[in-house]
Image: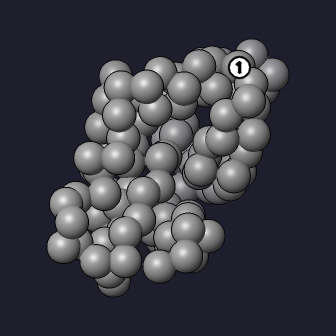
Amino acid sequence: MARNLAETRAARWYRLRGYRIIGTNVWVAGYELDVLAARGGTLAVCEVKSKTTGAFGDPIEMVTPEKIRRITRATEAWLAGNPEYRDYVVRFDVITVAGTRLRCVGAAFP
């Protein structure tokens, strides 16, 4: 599955649950944030990982400690440039797409 298709599906998943999409494929501090979505006082920062099939492991295994560090750093930089979201509770989600199956792991890392 093309990466952009997986990210489009992830953004749609959030919209169907009442989130407002703030941005997709947002580059900040040299890193990319796949999906930023807000609902109420929560900002979901979502990393999207996809594989064509689930045969070679779960896509969530591709979210390494280094990737988490980069996402966290980019989120901090993004929040510094968008003070209107400063008081939001930030939650880091991972959406995986393996074949046609989409799964959201909410609060996947601190």
Q: Position of residue 65 (x, y in %)?
A: 35, 26
**Residue at 46% across / 32% down in the picture?**
67
Q: Is residue 88 visible?
A: no
Nearest the viewer among 98 and 21 is 98
Residue at the right extreme of this rendering = 81
Nearest the viewer among 40 and 97 is 97
Q: Is residue 58 visible?
A: yes
**Residue at 29% across / 50% down in the picture?**
60
Q: Position of residue 21 (x, y in %)?
A: 65, 55
Nearest the viewer among 55 and 69 is 55
Residue at the bottom extreme of this rendering = 100
**Residue at 22% across / 72% down in the picture?**
54
Please, what is the three-letter code of the amino acid marked with disc 1?
A: Ala
- 32 to 21, vertically: above or below: above
Q: Secondary structure at mark 1?
A: helix
- 31 to 54, vertically: above or below: above
Mark 1 burial class by Cα count in 10 Å: few <14, some 14-19, many 20+: some
* Left or right position of 83 against 108: right
Q: Locate the C terminus and report the quarter of the image it occupies.
A: top left
* Left or right position of 76 against 71: right
- 7 to 42, vertically: above or below: below
Q: Position of residue 9 (x, y in %)?
A: 51, 73
Q: Which residue is mark 1?
A: 77
Colour scheme in the image? one colour
Count of numbered labels shown in the rendering:
1
Nearest the viewer among 93 and 73 is 73
Q: Position of residue 18 (x, y in %)?
A: 50, 61
**Residue at 61% across / 26% down in the picture?**
75
